[in-house]
Image (spheres, helix red, strand yellow):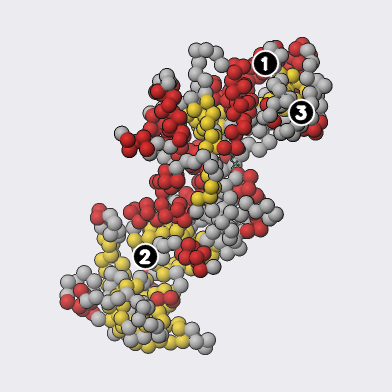
Amino acid sequence: MAEDVKSLNFIEHIIEEDLRSGYSKNDLRFRFPPEPNGYLHVGHASSICLNFGLGLKYNAPVNLRFDDTNPAKEEKEYVEAIKADVSWLGFKWDTECYASDYFQQLYDWAVQLIKEGKAYVDSQSSEDIANQKGTPTEPGKASPFRDRSVEENLRLFDGMKNGEFKEGEHVLRAKIDMASSNMLMRDPVMYRILHKAHHRTNTDWCIYPMYDWTHGESDYIEQISHSLCTLEFLPHRELYDWFLDQLVSKNKLRPKQREFARRNLSHTVVSKRKLLQLVASGVVAGWDDPRMPTISGMRRRGFTPESIRNFADTIGIAKRENVVDVSLLEFHVREHLNKIAPRVMAVLNPLKLVITNYEEGKEEWLDAENNPEDEGAGFRKVPFSKELYIEQEDFREEANRKFFRLKLDGEVRLKNGYIIKAESCTKDANGNVIEVQCTYDPKSKSGSGTEESLRKVKGTLHWVSIPHAVTAEVRLYDRLFNDPTPDAHKDRDFMDFVNPDSLEKLTGYLEPSLKEAKVGDQFQFQRMGYFNVDKDSTEDHMVFNRTVTLRDTWAKLEQKD
Ligand code: ATP
Ligand code: MG
Protein backbone atom coordinates (compact mmCIF):
# COMPACT_ATOMS: atom_id res chain seq x y z
CA MET A 1 0.00 0.00 0.00
CA ALA A 2 2.73 2.44 1.04
CA GLU A 3 4.58 1.47 -2.14
CA ASP A 4 1.49 2.24 -4.18
CA VAL A 5 1.05 5.68 -2.74
CA LYS A 6 4.68 6.53 -3.25
CA SER A 7 4.54 5.68 -6.94
CA LEU A 8 1.55 7.92 -7.67
CA ASN A 9 2.29 10.90 -9.86
CA PHE A 10 0.98 14.31 -8.88
CA ILE A 11 -2.07 14.05 -11.15
CA GLU A 12 -2.98 10.73 -9.54
CA HIS A 13 -2.63 12.38 -6.15
CA ILE A 14 -5.15 15.02 -7.24
CA ILE A 15 -7.54 12.31 -8.41
CA GLU A 16 -7.13 10.30 -5.20
CA GLU A 17 -7.82 13.43 -3.20
CA ASP A 18 -10.98 14.07 -5.25
CA LEU A 19 -12.11 10.50 -4.66
CA ARG A 20 -11.65 10.98 -0.94
CA SER A 21 -13.59 14.23 -0.96
CA GLY A 22 -16.72 12.96 -2.64
CA TYR A 23 -16.13 12.15 -6.31
CA SER A 24 -17.25 8.68 -7.17
CA LYS A 25 -15.05 6.44 -9.29
CA ASN A 26 -17.86 6.48 -11.84
CA ASP A 27 -17.40 10.23 -12.24
CA LEU A 28 -13.91 9.86 -13.62
CA ARG A 29 -13.60 10.55 -17.30
CA PHE A 30 -10.63 11.78 -19.33
CA ARG A 31 -9.92 12.97 -22.83
CA PHE A 32 -7.04 13.41 -25.22
CA PRO A 33 -7.74 16.59 -27.23
CA PRO A 34 -5.50 17.01 -30.29
CA GLU A 35 -6.00 19.78 -32.77
CA PRO A 36 -6.03 18.10 -36.22
CA ASN A 37 -3.51 20.54 -37.67
CA GLY A 38 -0.60 18.14 -38.02
CA TYR A 39 0.69 14.71 -37.10
CA LEU A 40 1.16 13.64 -33.50
CA HIS A 41 4.65 13.63 -32.09
CA VAL A 42 6.47 12.05 -29.18
CA GLY A 43 5.26 14.84 -26.85
CA HIS A 44 1.68 13.91 -27.67
CA ALA A 45 2.60 10.29 -26.98
CA SER A 46 3.33 11.34 -23.39
CA SER A 47 -0.05 13.01 -23.12
CA ILE A 48 -1.78 9.99 -24.70
CA CYS A 49 -0.04 7.61 -22.28
CA LEU A 50 -0.98 9.86 -19.37
CA ASN A 51 -4.68 10.20 -20.23
CA PHE A 52 -5.27 6.67 -21.46
CA GLY A 53 -3.07 5.34 -18.65
CA LEU A 54 -5.40 7.01 -16.15
CA GLY A 55 -8.35 5.52 -17.99
CA LEU A 56 -6.88 2.04 -17.58
CA LYS A 57 -5.85 2.61 -14.00
CA TYR A 58 -9.28 3.87 -12.86
CA ASN A 59 -11.28 1.87 -15.38
CA ALA A 60 -12.67 5.17 -16.66
CA PRO A 61 -13.62 6.17 -20.21
CA VAL A 62 -11.24 8.30 -22.27
CA ASN A 63 -12.55 10.33 -25.19
CA LEU A 64 -10.59 11.18 -28.27
CA ARG A 65 -11.60 14.78 -28.88
CA PHE A 66 -10.62 16.71 -31.94
CA ASP A 67 -10.21 20.34 -31.04
CA ASP A 68 -11.20 21.50 -34.48
CA THR A 69 -12.06 25.17 -34.18
CA ASN A 70 -9.62 26.62 -36.70
CA PRO A 71 -10.66 25.64 -40.24
CA ALA A 72 -7.67 27.47 -41.69
CA LYS A 73 -5.21 24.87 -40.45
CA GLU A 74 -7.15 21.68 -39.92
CA GLU A 75 -7.68 18.80 -42.29
CA LYS A 76 -9.32 15.41 -42.44
CA GLU A 77 -6.01 13.82 -43.35
CA TYR A 78 -4.73 14.78 -39.88
CA VAL A 79 -7.83 13.39 -38.18
CA GLU A 80 -7.25 10.00 -39.81
CA ALA A 81 -3.53 10.02 -38.99
CA ILE A 82 -4.21 10.89 -35.36
CA LYS A 83 -6.70 8.04 -35.01
CA ALA A 84 -4.24 5.61 -36.55
CA ASP A 85 -1.48 6.78 -34.22
CA VAL A 86 -3.50 6.50 -31.01
CA SER A 87 -4.67 3.01 -32.00
CA TRP A 88 -1.17 1.96 -32.94
CA LEU A 89 0.10 3.03 -29.52
CA GLY A 90 -2.34 0.45 -28.18
CA PHE A 91 -5.12 2.59 -26.75
CA LYS A 92 -8.89 2.50 -27.25
CA TRP A 93 -10.98 5.62 -26.87
CA ASP A 94 -14.50 5.53 -25.52
CA THR A 95 -16.08 8.14 -27.84
CA GLU A 96 -14.73 9.96 -30.85
CA CYS A 97 -15.71 13.59 -30.30
CA TYR A 98 -15.32 16.83 -32.19
CA ALA A 99 -15.48 20.34 -30.80
CA SER A 100 -17.20 21.19 -34.08
CA ASP A 101 -20.13 19.01 -32.98
CA TYR A 102 -20.68 21.53 -30.20
CA PHE A 103 -20.76 24.66 -32.39
CA GLN A 104 -24.53 25.08 -31.99
CA GLN A 105 -24.46 24.51 -28.24
CA LEU A 106 -21.55 26.94 -27.87
CA TYR A 107 -23.43 29.49 -29.93
CA ASP A 108 -26.54 29.12 -27.78
CA TRP A 109 -24.49 29.55 -24.63
CA ALA A 110 -22.84 32.64 -26.09
CA VAL A 111 -26.30 34.10 -26.75
CA GLN A 112 -27.16 33.32 -23.13
CA LEU A 113 -24.06 35.22 -21.95
CA ILE A 114 -24.99 38.19 -24.13
CA LYS A 115 -28.48 38.21 -22.62
CA GLU A 116 -26.98 38.16 -19.14
CA GLY A 117 -24.75 41.12 -20.01
CA LYS A 118 -21.62 38.97 -19.88
CA ALA A 119 -20.55 39.22 -23.50
CA TYR A 120 -20.53 41.95 -26.14
CA VAL A 121 -19.71 42.51 -29.77
CA ASP A 122 -16.61 44.62 -30.25
CA SER A 123 -16.30 46.35 -33.62
CA GLN A 124 -12.73 47.53 -33.28
CA SER A 125 -9.80 46.20 -35.25
CA SER A 126 -7.68 43.51 -33.64
CA GLU A 127 -4.83 46.07 -33.38
CA ASP A 128 -7.00 48.46 -31.39
CA ILE A 129 -8.14 45.67 -29.13
CA ALA A 130 -4.53 44.61 -28.56
CA ASN A 131 -3.47 48.20 -27.84
CA GLN A 132 -6.11 48.55 -25.15
CA LYS A 133 -5.10 45.36 -23.35
CA GLY A 134 -2.64 47.14 -21.05
CA THR A 135 0.34 45.39 -19.51
CA PRO A 136 0.61 42.99 -16.59
CA THR A 137 1.17 45.98 -14.29
CA GLU A 138 -1.18 48.45 -16.01
CA PRO A 139 -4.90 47.89 -16.40
CA GLY A 140 -6.41 47.76 -19.86
CA LYS A 141 -8.83 50.29 -21.34
CA ALA A 142 -12.48 49.52 -21.93
CA SER A 143 -13.59 49.23 -25.52
CA PRO A 144 -15.99 51.99 -26.64
CA PHE A 145 -18.36 49.12 -27.54
CA ARG A 146 -18.23 47.51 -24.10
CA ASP A 147 -21.58 48.89 -23.02
CA ARG A 148 -23.61 48.13 -26.08
CA SER A 149 -27.18 47.17 -25.31
CA VAL A 150 -28.15 43.52 -25.16
CA GLU A 151 -30.44 44.04 -28.16
CA GLU A 152 -27.68 45.50 -30.30
CA ASN A 153 -25.26 42.76 -29.26
CA LEU A 154 -27.80 40.08 -30.12
CA ARG A 155 -28.52 41.67 -33.48
CA LEU A 156 -24.82 42.00 -34.38
CA PHE A 157 -23.92 38.52 -33.18
CA ASP A 158 -26.75 37.11 -35.25
CA GLY A 159 -25.42 39.08 -38.22
CA MET A 160 -21.93 37.73 -37.62
CA LYS A 161 -23.32 34.21 -37.67
CA ASN A 162 -25.33 34.88 -40.82
CA GLY A 163 -22.34 36.05 -42.79
CA GLU A 164 -23.31 39.70 -42.97
CA PHE A 165 -19.81 40.91 -42.06
CA LYS A 166 -16.29 40.58 -43.33
CA GLU A 167 -13.51 38.90 -41.39
CA GLY A 168 -12.19 41.20 -38.69
CA GLU A 169 -15.22 43.50 -38.69
CA HIS A 170 -16.52 42.30 -35.33
CA VAL A 171 -15.62 39.86 -32.58
CA LEU A 172 -17.58 38.63 -29.59
CA ARG A 173 -15.83 39.25 -26.28
CA ALA A 174 -16.58 38.08 -22.78
CA LYS A 175 -17.19 40.97 -20.42
CA ILE A 176 -15.00 40.17 -17.44
CA ASP A 177 -12.47 42.60 -16.03
CA MET A 178 -10.21 44.97 -17.96
CA ALA A 179 -8.15 45.52 -14.82
CA SER A 180 -7.57 41.86 -13.95
CA SER A 181 -3.97 41.00 -13.08
CA ASN A 182 -4.45 38.07 -15.45
CA MET A 183 -4.31 39.53 -18.95
CA LEU A 184 -6.38 36.63 -20.27
CA MET A 185 -9.31 37.84 -18.15
CA ARG A 186 -9.36 41.25 -19.83
CA ASP A 187 -12.41 40.64 -21.95
CA PRO A 188 -11.09 37.72 -24.01
CA VAL A 189 -12.32 37.13 -27.54
CA MET A 190 -14.85 34.27 -27.73
CA TYR A 191 -15.67 34.32 -31.45
CA ARG A 192 -14.07 35.60 -34.63
CA ILE A 193 -15.42 35.72 -38.16
CA LEU A 194 -13.71 33.33 -40.57
CA HIS A 195 -15.15 32.84 -44.03
CA LYS A 196 -13.53 29.45 -44.41
CA ALA A 197 -14.99 26.06 -44.99
CA HIS A 198 -14.50 23.63 -42.15
CA HIS A 199 -13.51 20.02 -42.85
CA ARG A 200 -16.64 18.81 -41.05
CA THR A 201 -19.19 21.61 -40.87
CA ASN A 202 -18.32 22.91 -44.32
CA THR A 203 -19.82 26.42 -44.71
CA ASP A 204 -22.47 26.07 -42.01
CA TRP A 205 -20.54 28.47 -39.85
CA CYS A 206 -18.53 31.57 -40.55
CA ILE A 207 -17.90 32.40 -36.90
CA TYR A 208 -15.61 30.09 -34.99
CA PRO A 209 -15.17 29.83 -31.21
CA MET A 210 -11.75 30.47 -29.67
CA TYR A 211 -9.83 27.80 -27.75
CA ASP A 212 -10.73 29.16 -24.31
CA TRP A 213 -14.38 29.34 -25.13
CA THR A 214 -14.37 25.83 -26.51
CA HIS A 215 -12.20 23.67 -24.41
CA GLY A 216 -13.78 23.82 -20.97
CA GLU A 217 -17.26 23.82 -22.49
CA SER A 218 -16.43 20.69 -24.50
CA ASP A 219 -15.12 19.12 -21.29
CA TYR A 220 -18.40 20.06 -19.62
CA ILE A 221 -20.54 18.65 -22.43
CA GLU A 222 -18.59 15.39 -22.30
CA GLN A 223 -18.55 15.48 -18.49
CA ILE A 224 -14.78 15.13 -18.33
CA SER A 225 -13.70 15.08 -14.69
CA HIS A 226 -10.04 15.94 -15.14
CA SER A 227 -8.94 17.95 -18.14
CA LEU A 228 -5.18 17.63 -18.31
CA CYS A 229 -3.18 20.01 -20.41
CA THR A 230 0.33 21.38 -20.61
CA LEU A 231 1.69 24.10 -18.39
CA GLU A 232 1.33 26.99 -20.80
CA PHE A 233 -2.38 26.78 -20.06
CA LEU A 234 -1.94 27.46 -16.35
CA PRO A 235 -2.86 31.15 -16.74
CA HIS A 236 -5.90 30.05 -18.79
CA ARG A 237 -7.29 28.11 -15.84
CA GLU A 238 -8.93 31.21 -14.34
CA LEU A 239 -10.75 31.82 -17.60
CA TYR A 240 -11.63 28.12 -17.96
CA ASP A 241 -13.26 28.37 -14.54
CA TRP A 242 -14.97 31.69 -15.24
CA PHE A 243 -16.69 30.33 -18.35
CA LEU A 244 -17.80 27.23 -16.44
CA ASP A 245 -19.09 29.38 -13.58
CA GLN A 246 -21.52 30.95 -16.02
CA LEU A 247 -22.84 27.61 -17.28
CA VAL A 248 -22.52 24.71 -14.89
CA SER A 249 -25.75 23.48 -13.45
CA LYS A 250 -25.87 21.93 -10.00
CA ASN A 251 -26.61 18.34 -10.91
CA LYS A 252 -23.76 18.14 -13.39
CA LEU A 253 -20.12 17.38 -12.87
CA ARG A 254 -17.81 20.35 -13.11
CA PRO A 255 -14.59 19.55 -14.98
CA LYS A 256 -11.27 20.75 -13.61
CA GLN A 257 -8.24 21.70 -15.58
CA ARG A 258 -4.87 20.62 -14.25
CA GLU A 259 -1.50 21.18 -15.89
CA PHE A 260 1.64 19.14 -16.38
CA ALA A 261 4.94 19.95 -18.07
CA ARG A 262 5.33 19.68 -21.81
CA ARG A 263 7.73 16.93 -22.82
CA ASN A 264 10.74 17.90 -24.87
CA LEU A 265 13.12 15.46 -26.44
CA SER A 266 16.76 16.26 -27.14
CA HIS A 267 18.13 16.71 -30.67
CA THR A 268 14.71 17.32 -32.14
CA VAL A 269 11.73 19.68 -32.05
CA VAL A 270 8.28 18.76 -30.75
CA SER A 271 5.92 21.30 -32.18
CA LYS A 272 3.60 20.57 -35.06
CA ARG A 273 4.32 23.97 -36.55
CA LYS A 274 8.07 23.34 -36.64
CA LEU A 275 7.65 19.78 -37.84
CA LEU A 276 5.47 21.11 -40.65
CA GLN A 277 8.29 23.49 -41.53
CA LEU A 278 10.70 20.55 -41.80
CA VAL A 279 8.27 18.78 -44.12
CA ALA A 280 7.43 21.85 -46.21
CA SER A 281 11.07 22.83 -46.68
CA GLY A 282 12.04 19.34 -47.82
CA VAL A 283 14.54 18.71 -45.01
CA VAL A 284 12.70 15.45 -44.47
CA ALA A 285 10.69 13.38 -46.94
CA GLY A 286 7.36 13.72 -45.12
CA TRP A 287 5.62 13.56 -41.73
CA ASP A 288 6.54 9.90 -41.47
CA ASP A 289 10.18 10.29 -42.42
CA PRO A 290 11.98 7.90 -40.05
CA ARG A 291 14.03 10.79 -38.65
CA MET A 292 10.91 12.66 -37.51
CA PRO A 293 9.83 12.52 -33.85
CA THR A 294 6.26 11.99 -35.05
CA ILE A 295 4.49 8.83 -34.00
CA SER A 296 4.21 7.88 -37.67
CA GLY A 297 7.93 8.55 -38.19
CA MET A 298 8.87 6.47 -35.18
CA ARG A 299 6.59 3.67 -36.34
CA ARG A 300 8.15 3.65 -39.79
CA ARG A 301 11.60 3.72 -38.23
CA GLY A 302 10.80 0.56 -36.26
CA PHE A 303 10.15 1.93 -32.78
CA THR A 304 7.51 -0.26 -31.14
CA PRO A 305 4.39 0.90 -29.25
CA GLU A 306 5.69 -0.97 -26.19
CA SER A 307 8.99 0.90 -26.24
CA ILE A 308 7.30 4.29 -26.59
CA ARG A 309 4.89 3.47 -23.77
CA ASN A 310 7.71 2.23 -21.55
CA PHE A 311 9.65 5.39 -22.31
CA ALA A 312 6.65 7.55 -21.36
CA ASP A 313 6.19 5.56 -18.15
CA THR A 314 9.84 5.91 -17.21
CA ILE A 315 9.94 9.67 -17.63
CA GLY A 316 6.54 10.02 -15.99
CA ILE A 317 4.99 13.45 -15.77
CA ALA A 318 6.54 16.52 -14.30
CA LYS A 319 5.54 19.91 -12.99
CA ARG A 320 8.45 21.63 -14.65
CA GLU A 321 9.63 21.53 -18.23
CA ASN A 322 12.83 19.74 -19.05
CA VAL A 323 14.52 18.02 -21.95
CA VAL A 324 14.67 14.25 -21.98
CA ASP A 325 17.64 12.78 -23.79
CA VAL A 326 16.62 10.88 -26.90
CA SER A 327 19.04 8.10 -25.91
CA LEU A 328 16.59 7.15 -23.16
CA LEU A 329 13.94 6.54 -25.82
CA GLU A 330 16.44 4.55 -27.86
CA PHE A 331 17.34 2.53 -24.77
CA HIS A 332 13.72 1.41 -24.48
CA VAL A 333 13.56 0.61 -28.19
CA ARG A 334 16.68 -1.55 -27.92
CA GLU A 335 15.41 -3.27 -24.81
CA HIS A 336 12.19 -4.31 -26.50
CA LEU A 337 13.70 -5.24 -29.87
CA ASN A 338 16.31 -7.35 -28.12
CA LYS A 339 13.47 -9.56 -26.93
CA ILE A 340 11.49 -9.79 -30.12
CA ALA A 341 13.73 -9.22 -33.12
CA PRO A 342 15.07 -12.29 -34.94
CA ARG A 343 18.82 -12.29 -35.49
CA VAL A 344 20.15 -12.33 -39.01
CA MET A 345 23.44 -11.62 -40.72
CA ALA A 346 23.99 -8.68 -43.02
CA VAL A 347 27.16 -6.95 -44.19
CA LEU A 348 26.97 -3.22 -44.77
CA ASN A 349 30.55 -2.36 -45.80
CA PRO A 350 31.69 -5.48 -47.60
CA LEU A 351 35.20 -6.88 -47.80
CA LYS A 352 35.64 -10.03 -49.84
CA LEU A 353 37.00 -13.04 -48.04
CA VAL A 354 38.10 -16.19 -49.91
CA ILE A 355 38.57 -19.49 -48.09
CA THR A 356 41.36 -21.06 -50.10
CA ASN A 357 40.98 -24.60 -48.76
CA TYR A 358 37.19 -24.70 -49.18
CA GLU A 359 36.02 -26.60 -52.20
CA GLU A 360 35.03 -24.51 -55.23
CA GLY A 361 31.26 -24.59 -55.87
CA LYS A 362 30.45 -26.29 -52.56
CA GLU A 363 27.67 -24.93 -50.36
CA GLU A 364 26.57 -25.85 -46.85
CA TRP A 365 23.43 -24.77 -45.02
CA LEU A 366 24.37 -24.07 -41.44
CA ASP A 367 22.04 -23.96 -38.45
CA ALA A 368 21.61 -20.50 -37.02
CA GLU A 369 19.67 -19.62 -33.88
CA ASN A 370 16.95 -17.06 -34.51
CA ASN A 371 16.89 -15.40 -31.12
CA PRO A 372 18.83 -16.50 -28.05
CA GLU A 373 16.48 -14.29 -25.96
CA ASP A 374 13.46 -16.25 -27.13
CA GLU A 375 13.60 -20.03 -26.82
CA GLY A 376 10.60 -20.55 -29.06
CA ALA A 377 12.16 -18.64 -31.95
CA GLY A 378 13.93 -21.74 -33.30
CA PHE A 379 16.60 -22.07 -35.95
CA ARG A 380 17.04 -21.25 -39.61
CA LYS A 381 19.57 -22.25 -42.25
CA VAL A 382 22.21 -19.90 -43.63
CA PRO A 383 24.33 -20.79 -46.66
CA PHE A 384 28.11 -20.99 -46.42
CA SER A 385 30.50 -21.05 -49.39
CA LYS A 386 34.06 -20.37 -50.48
CA GLU A 387 33.52 -16.63 -51.01
CA LEU A 388 32.08 -14.49 -48.29
CA TYR A 389 31.69 -10.88 -47.30
CA ILE A 390 32.74 -9.60 -43.92
CA GLU A 391 32.72 -5.99 -42.72
CA GLN A 392 35.71 -3.93 -43.82
CA GLU A 393 36.27 -2.79 -40.27
CA ASP A 394 36.54 -6.40 -39.10
CA PHE A 395 39.90 -6.89 -40.83
CA ARG A 396 43.27 -5.27 -40.28
CA GLU A 397 46.61 -6.39 -41.59
CA GLU A 398 48.17 -5.63 -38.28
CA ALA A 399 46.61 -4.81 -34.98
CA ASN A 400 47.37 -4.95 -31.29
CA ARG A 401 46.15 -7.68 -28.97
CA LYS A 402 42.98 -5.83 -28.12
CA PHE A 403 41.70 -6.16 -31.68
CA PHE A 404 39.57 -9.30 -31.40
CA ARG A 405 38.62 -9.33 -35.04
CA LEU A 406 40.54 -10.68 -38.00
CA LYS A 407 44.20 -9.83 -38.65
CA LEU A 408 46.88 -11.55 -40.68
CA ASP A 409 47.90 -14.82 -39.01
CA GLY A 410 45.04 -14.39 -36.58
CA GLU A 411 41.97 -16.53 -36.06
CA VAL A 412 38.29 -15.76 -35.62
CA ARG A 413 35.11 -17.76 -35.67
CA LEU A 414 32.59 -17.06 -38.38
CA LYS A 415 29.23 -16.91 -36.59
CA ASN A 416 27.35 -20.24 -36.90
CA GLY A 417 30.27 -21.56 -39.01
CA TYR A 418 33.96 -22.32 -38.83
CA ILE A 419 37.16 -20.99 -37.36
CA ILE A 420 39.21 -19.28 -40.06
CA LYS A 421 42.74 -17.93 -40.20
CA ALA A 422 43.80 -14.95 -42.34
CA GLU A 423 46.79 -15.91 -44.47
CA SER A 424 47.24 -13.00 -46.89
CA CYS A 425 45.48 -10.06 -48.47
CA THR A 426 45.27 -8.20 -51.77
CA LYS A 427 45.29 -4.41 -52.08
CA ASP A 428 44.30 -1.93 -54.75
CA ALA A 429 46.56 0.79 -56.15
CA ASN A 430 45.72 3.05 -53.21
CA GLY A 431 46.75 0.49 -50.67
CA ASN A 432 43.22 -0.41 -49.61
CA VAL A 433 42.63 -4.06 -48.80
CA ILE A 434 40.16 -5.46 -51.31
CA GLU A 435 40.35 -9.18 -50.56
CA VAL A 436 41.48 -11.41 -47.72
CA GLN A 437 42.61 -14.99 -48.28
CA CYS A 438 41.95 -17.37 -45.40
CA THR A 439 42.04 -21.04 -44.55
CA TYR A 440 39.37 -22.74 -42.46
CA ASP A 441 39.43 -25.63 -40.02
CA PRO A 442 36.84 -28.13 -41.39
CA LYS A 443 36.49 -29.78 -37.96
CA SER A 444 35.58 -26.56 -36.16
CA LYS A 445 31.99 -26.24 -37.38
CA SER A 446 29.73 -24.66 -34.73
CA GLY A 447 27.46 -27.09 -32.99
CA SER A 448 29.17 -30.20 -34.45
CA GLY A 449 30.35 -31.26 -31.00
CA THR A 450 33.95 -31.94 -32.02
CA GLU A 451 36.86 -30.84 -29.86
CA GLU A 452 37.75 -28.27 -32.52
CA SER A 453 34.22 -26.87 -32.59
CA LEU A 454 34.47 -26.16 -28.87
CA ARG A 455 37.83 -24.42 -29.21
CA LYS A 456 37.58 -20.83 -28.00
CA VAL A 457 38.86 -18.03 -30.20
CA LYS A 458 38.55 -14.42 -29.16
CA GLY A 459 36.49 -12.95 -31.96
CA THR A 460 33.27 -13.94 -33.74
CA LEU A 461 32.35 -12.19 -36.97
CA HIS A 462 29.14 -12.04 -38.94
CA TRP A 463 29.38 -12.74 -42.65
CA VAL A 464 27.33 -13.39 -45.77
CA SER A 465 27.95 -15.88 -48.56
CA ILE A 466 28.55 -13.83 -51.72
CA PRO A 467 26.73 -16.05 -54.22
CA HIS A 468 23.70 -16.28 -51.95
CA ALA A 469 23.57 -12.66 -50.77
CA VAL A 470 20.50 -10.51 -51.27
CA THR A 471 21.30 -6.88 -51.92
CA ALA A 472 19.19 -4.15 -50.39
CA GLU A 473 19.26 -0.45 -49.83
CA VAL A 474 20.03 0.26 -46.21
CA ARG A 475 19.23 3.65 -44.70
CA LEU A 476 21.18 4.72 -41.66
CA TYR A 477 19.82 7.59 -39.60
CA ASP A 478 21.50 9.99 -37.30
CA ARG A 479 20.13 12.80 -35.15
CA LEU A 480 18.06 15.23 -37.21
CA PHE A 481 19.66 18.14 -35.33
CA ASN A 482 23.25 18.62 -34.24
CA ASP A 483 22.22 20.52 -31.18
CA PRO A 484 20.49 19.01 -28.15
CA THR A 485 17.98 21.88 -27.95
CA PRO A 486 17.72 23.34 -31.45
CA ASP A 487 14.75 25.58 -30.67
CA ALA A 488 16.05 26.96 -27.40
CA HIS A 489 18.51 29.45 -28.87
CA LYS A 490 17.39 33.04 -28.64
CA ASP A 491 19.17 34.42 -31.69
CA ARG A 492 19.24 31.38 -33.90
CA ASP A 493 16.57 29.64 -35.88
CA PHE A 494 16.14 25.95 -35.12
CA MET A 495 16.60 25.22 -38.85
CA ASP A 496 20.24 26.38 -38.52
CA PHE A 497 20.96 23.24 -36.53
CA VAL A 498 19.70 20.67 -39.01
CA ASN A 499 22.27 17.86 -39.25
CA PRO A 500 23.20 17.61 -42.95
CA ASP A 501 24.36 14.01 -42.43
CA SER A 502 21.25 12.62 -40.78
CA LEU A 503 20.64 10.13 -43.60
CA GLU A 504 23.17 7.79 -45.16
CA LYS A 505 22.26 5.25 -47.83
CA LEU A 506 24.27 2.09 -48.37
CA THR A 507 23.96 -1.11 -50.33
CA GLY A 508 23.85 -3.98 -47.88
CA TYR A 509 24.44 -7.71 -48.49
CA LEU A 510 22.00 -9.83 -46.56
CA GLU A 511 21.56 -13.50 -45.86
CA PRO A 512 18.95 -14.93 -48.27
CA SER A 513 16.30 -15.60 -45.60
CA LEU A 514 15.61 -11.86 -45.71
CA LYS A 515 14.19 -12.15 -49.19
CA GLU A 516 10.90 -13.19 -47.55
CA ALA A 517 10.74 -10.18 -45.20
CA LYS A 518 7.65 -7.98 -45.36
CA VAL A 519 7.25 -4.25 -44.82
CA GLY A 520 7.55 -3.51 -41.11
CA ASP A 521 9.32 -6.78 -40.20
CA GLN A 522 12.05 -6.20 -37.65
CA PHE A 523 15.46 -7.81 -37.28
CA GLN A 524 18.68 -7.57 -35.44
CA PHE A 525 21.47 -7.46 -38.00
CA GLN A 526 23.98 -9.10 -35.75
CA ARG A 527 26.63 -6.75 -34.43
CA MET A 528 25.13 -3.91 -36.57
CA GLY A 529 21.88 -2.86 -34.95
CA TYR A 530 18.13 -3.24 -35.30
CA PHE A 531 16.59 -2.81 -38.72
CA ASN A 532 13.16 -3.04 -40.32
CA VAL A 533 11.77 -3.23 -43.82
CA ASP A 534 10.74 0.19 -45.10
CA LYS A 535 7.53 0.86 -46.98
CA ASP A 536 9.59 2.06 -49.96
CA SER A 537 10.52 -1.58 -50.62
CA THR A 538 9.45 -3.17 -53.88
CA GLU A 539 9.65 -6.73 -55.17
CA ASP A 540 13.15 -6.27 -56.54
CA HIS A 541 14.45 -3.40 -54.47
CA MET A 542 14.29 -3.96 -50.73
CA VAL A 543 14.84 -1.04 -48.41
CA PHE A 544 15.79 -1.37 -44.76
CA ASN A 545 15.85 1.29 -42.05
CA ARG A 546 18.26 1.16 -39.19
CA THR A 547 15.95 1.62 -36.22
CA VAL A 548 18.74 1.96 -33.68
CA THR A 549 22.32 0.84 -33.21
CA LEU A 550 23.11 -1.91 -30.74
CA ARG A 551 24.84 0.46 -28.39
CA ASP A 552 24.66 4.15 -27.78
CA THR A 553 27.50 5.41 -29.98
CA TRP A 554 26.28 9.00 -29.81
CA ALA A 555 26.76 9.35 -26.04
CA LYS A 556 30.38 8.28 -26.49
CA LEU A 557 30.94 10.80 -29.27
CA GLU A 558 29.55 13.65 -27.22
CA GLN A 559 31.81 12.78 -24.32
CA LYS A 560 34.85 13.00 -26.59
CA ASP A 561 33.94 16.48 -27.87
P1 ATP B 1 1.95 21.60 -30.94
O1 ATP B 1 2.59 22.89 -30.55
O2 ATP B 1 2.91 20.54 -31.29
O3 ATP B 1 0.86 21.78 -31.98
P2 ATP B 1 -0.19 21.49 -29.14
O4 ATP B 1 -0.18 21.46 -27.64
O5 ATP B 1 -0.68 22.71 -29.80
O6 ATP B 1 1.24 21.10 -29.62
P3 ATP B 1 -2.46 19.83 -29.46
O7 ATP B 1 -2.88 19.02 -30.62
O8 ATP B 1 -3.27 21.03 -29.11
O9 ATP B 1 -0.98 20.25 -29.72
O10 ATP B 1 -2.25 18.92 -28.19
C1 ATP B 1 -3.05 17.84 -27.79
C2 ATP B 1 -2.68 17.47 -26.38
O11 ATP B 1 -1.33 17.03 -26.31
C3 ATP B 1 -2.78 18.67 -25.45
O12 ATP B 1 -3.37 18.25 -24.24
C4 ATP B 1 -1.36 19.09 -25.26
O13 ATP B 1 -1.19 19.76 -24.06
C5 ATP B 1 -0.61 17.75 -25.35
N1 ATP B 1 0.78 17.96 -25.78
C6 ATP B 1 1.20 18.59 -26.90
N2 ATP B 1 2.53 18.65 -26.94
C7 ATP B 1 2.99 18.03 -25.84
C8 ATP B 1 4.28 17.76 -25.31
N3 ATP B 1 5.39 18.15 -25.93
N4 ATP B 1 4.35 17.09 -24.14
C9 ATP B 1 3.25 16.69 -23.50
N5 ATP B 1 2.00 16.91 -23.94
C10 ATP B 1 1.86 17.57 -25.09
MG1 MG C 1 -2.15 23.65 -30.58
Amino acid type, callout 3: Gly
Ranked by sequence position, the earlier of labels 1 and 3 is 1
Q: Is residue 151 above or below residue 382?
A: above
Q: Is residue 179 left or right of residue 99?
A: right
Label 2 to label 1: alpha-carbon separation: 67 Å
Q: Is residue 504 left or right of residue 498?
A: left
Q: Nearer the viewer, residue 489 or 421?
A: 489
Q: Secondary structure at mark 3?
A: loop
Give the number of the disc on residue 526. Answer: 2
Residue at x-position 48% and y-position 84%? 432
* Badge nearest the viewer, 2 or 1: 1
Counting from the top left corner in percent of width and height, residue 444 is at 23, 77
Counting from the top left corner in percent of width and height, residue 396 is at 41, 82
Give the number of the disc on residue 140. Answer: 3
Amino acid type, callout 1: Leu
Q: Is residue 202 visible?
A: no
Give the number of the disc on residue 235. Answer: none
Q: Nearer the viewer, residue 364 or 40?
A: 40
Q: Is residue 385 above or below residue 3?
A: below
Residue at x-position 35% and y-position 81%? 401
Q: Residues within 10 Å of mark 3 (few under 14, many from 20)?
A: many
Say which quadrant the N terminus sits in: top left
- The image quadrant where one finds ligand 1 is top right
Q: Residues within 10 Å of mark 2 (few under 14, many from 20)?
A: some
Give the number of the disc on residue 113. Answer: 1
Q: Nearer the viewer, residue 358 or 163?
A: 163
Q: Nearer the viewer, residue 441 or 268?
A: 268
Q: Secondary structure at mark 1?
A: helix
Q: Are marks 1 and 3 in contact (CB under 8 Å)?
A: no
Counting from the top left corner in percent of width and height, residue 22 is at 42, 19
